[in-house]
């Protein structure tokens, strides 16, 4: 059989462009959610810690969007996951 007779392999998974778009969308949704939670938290309890925790999460989301735009989607995914877990832990432990 020649190489032209072979069936091309089907590639499973996302293309790099699709992965970037998904990470940008996820970070944008998380950024909007963090802004809403920040507004709700500030309405109920005005604190520098609240602004610090959710402000850092907003900055991290922006960083993930920029990393995804530059093709560093895996690093952006790790940072997004770690940042979200850290913000939730800080909210639960420090702000509770």
Image: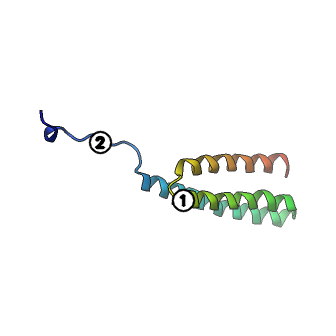
Q: Quadrant of residue 38?
A: bottom right
Q: Residue at x 86, y 62 (%)?
A: 48
Q: At which x and y percent is residue 71?
A: 50, 55
Q: Is residue 49 left or right of residue 82?
A: right
Q: Nearer the viewer, residue 22 or 75?
A: 75
Q: Residue at x 58, y 60 (%)?
A: 65
Can you say whether 87 is above or below 46 in the image?
Answer: above
Q: Are marks 2 and 1 in contact (CB under 8 Å)?
A: no
Q: Nearer the viewer, residue 94 or 15?
A: 15
Callout 1 secondary element: helix
Residue drawn at the location 43% of the way across and 55% of the way down: 18
Viewer-proximal residue among 16 and 21? 16
What residue did someone put label 1 on?
24
Q: Which residue is mark 2?
A: 10
Which secondary structure lies at badge 2?
loop
Horizontal and vertical percent for residue 69? Answer: 52, 60
């Amino acid at each position: 059989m020649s190489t032209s007779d072979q069936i091309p392999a089907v590639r499973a998974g996302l293309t790099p462009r699709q992965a970037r778009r998904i990470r940008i969308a996820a970070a944008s949704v998380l950024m909007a959610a963090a802004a809403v939670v920040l507004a709700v938290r500030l309405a109920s309890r005005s604190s520098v810690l609240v602004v610090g925790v959710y402000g850092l999460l907003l900055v991290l989301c922006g960083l993930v969007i920029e990393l995804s735009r530059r093709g560093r989607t895996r690093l952006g995914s790790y940072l997004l996951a770690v940042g979200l877990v850290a913000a939730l832990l800080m909210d639960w432990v420090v702000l509770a």
